Image (tube, grey):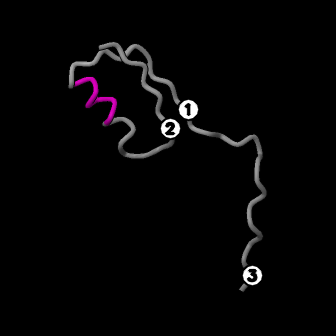
Amino acid sequence: KNLEVMVKGPGPGRESSIRALNAAGFRITNITDVTPIPHNGCRPPKKRRV
């Protein structure tokens, strides 16, 4: 009955899924955001010149 929710990434289902779990009778103890954020990882592709 007690839940620890971990959400990843942005989107419309992020908040609504937590609300659905709450409405289903689960007790949410804590919500953690585990969205992967690069520490200046990969180099972006070169810009297109037309």
The mark tally for this picture is 3
Q: Are marks 1 and 2 in contact (CB under 8 Å)?
A: yes
| Residue designated by label 2 | 8
Q: Callout 2: 10 Å neighbours few (<14), some, many (20+)?
A: few
Label 3: how many Cα within 10 Å (few below 14, some 14–19, many 20+): few
User: Where does label 3 land, which residue?
Assistant: 49
Question: Mark 3 or mark 1, which has the lower sequence index?
Answer: 1
Q: CA distance from mark 3 to mark 1?
A: 36 Å
Question: Please, is residue 9 above or below residue 22 in the view?
Answer: below
Report how far apart the C-alphas of labels 1 and 2 lie in the structure: 5 Å
Q: Residues within 10 Å of mark 1 (few under 14, many from 20)?
A: few
Tell me the residue at 30%/15% (across/down). 27
Magenta region, main secondary structure: helix
Q: CA distance from mark 3 to mark 2?
A: 34 Å
The image quarter containing residue 37 is top right
The magenta segment is 17-23
